[in-house]
Image (cartoon, helix red, strand yellow):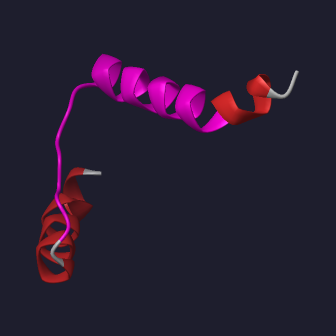
Amino acid sequence: MRLAQSMVKAHCRDLGIPYTETGLVDSYRQALRHMHEVGEPLHADN
């Protein structure tokens, strides 16, 4: 991952999208929060 980091940062900069670095625990927290948010409409129908 570290080898690709500079290329990914440059690509994000070229596309004008943000590049964010975070730790392992916070990355899991963000992923779980996102899955909860996108899955919430499925739970509303039940």
Q: Quadrant of the C terminus?
A: top right
Is residue 22 found left or right of 25 in the rendered image? left
Q: In the image, is residue 4 part of the stretch drawn in magenta?
A: no
* Residue that protrudes farthest toward the front in the picture: 45
* Picture mark count: 0
Which x, y percent locates residue 30? 38, 28
Which x, y percent locates residue 31? 46, 32
* Residue that protrudes farthest toward the right in the picture: 46
Residue range highlighted in magenta:
17-39
Which x, y percent locates residue 15? 21, 80
Which x, y percent locates residue 29? 39, 20
Is residue 23 found left or right of 30 in the rendered image? left
Q: Residue at x 23, y 67 (%)?
A: 8
User: Which residue is at the front of the view, 41 or 23?
Assistant: 41
Is residue 34 depicted above or below 17 in this figure? above
Which quadrant holds residue 11? bottom left
Most prominent secondary structure in the magenta stretch? helix
Is residue 36 found left or right of 39 in the rendered image? left
User: Which residue is at the front of the view, 5 or 37?
Assistant: 37
Q: Residue at x 20, y 70 (%)?
A: 12
Q: In the image, is residue 22 part of the stretch drawn in magenta?
A: yes
Q: Residue at x 54, y 31 (%)?
A: 37
User: Which residue is at the front of the view, 46 or 6?
Assistant: 46
Which quadrant holds residue 16? bottom left
Which quadrant holds residue 5? bottom left
* Residue that protrudes farthest toward the bottom in the picture: 14
Q: Residue at x 29, y 21 (%)?
A: 26
Is residue 46 depicted above or below 42 in this figure? above
